[in-house]
Image (cartoon, rainbow, N blue to C red):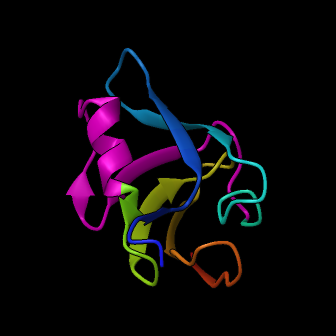
């Protein structure tokens, strides 16, 4: 049984220190969600991302299967959203979005 999961989200840090969605792995939880490339992720599980190294963001986006992450984001329309993504390997996907 896998001991490590993830949501398949790729991010990049811009010069201003903000983090944006850069891509999503095909077939991943992120790819089947309402995430869009270019959206800003401001925090993960209440941990602010401003000026955080991209590698550290990757660690925050991974975890054991069945665990979840809460993304605080600003979508492309400028609306703040909260997205809970549960990490299930390959089969189960459960996503809740709150605006």
Q: How many marks?
A: 0
Q: Is residue 30 above or below residue 95?
A: above
Could you say where residue 4 lies in the image, as x and y percent from the top left? 40, 65
Question: Is 51 displayed left or right of 89 in the figure?
Answer: left
Question: Is 14 displayed left or right of 57 in the figure?
Answer: right
Image-quadrant location for residue 64: bottom left
Question: Is 52 displayed left or right of 25 in the figure?
Answer: left
Write the residue at 69% across / 47% down. Answer: 25
Q: Residue furthest top?
A: 15
Could you say where residue 51 lies in the image, as x and y percent from the top left? 24, 30
Write the residue at 48% across / 56% down. Answer: 73
Write the residue at 31% across / 49% down. Answer: 59
Q: Is residue 69 above or below residue 28?
A: below
| Magenta-span inclusion, residue 58 | yes
What quarter of the picture does the C terminus occupy?
bottom right
Q: Is residue 27 above or below residue 16?
A: below
Image-quadrant location for residue 72: bottom left
| Magenta-span inclusion, residue 9 | no
Write the residue at 77% across / 65% down. Answer: 32
Image-quadrant location for residue 39: top right
Could you say where residue 38 lies in the image, as x and y percent from the top left? 64, 36
Could you say where residue 54 lies in the image, as x and y percent from the top left? 35, 32
Question: Is 41 displayed left or right of 77 in the figure?
Answer: left
Q: Residue furthest front?
A: 1
Q: Nearer the viewer, residue 27 or 16?
A: 27
Q: Nearer the viewer, residue 79 or 3?
A: 3
**Magenta region, residue range:** 34-60
């Amino acid at each position: 049984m896998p001991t490590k999961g993830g949501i398949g989200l790729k991010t990049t840090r811009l010069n201003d220190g903000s983090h944006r969605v850069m891509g999503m792995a095909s077939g991943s939880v992120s790819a089947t969600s309402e995430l869009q490339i270019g959206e800003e992720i401001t925090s993960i599980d209440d941990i602010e991302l401003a000026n955080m190294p991209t590698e550290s963001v990757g660690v925050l986006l991974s975890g054991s299967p069945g665990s979840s992450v809460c993304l605080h984001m600003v979508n492309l329309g400028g609306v703040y959203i909260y997205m809970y993504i549960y990490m299930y390997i390959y089969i189960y996907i459960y996503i809740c979005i709150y605006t």
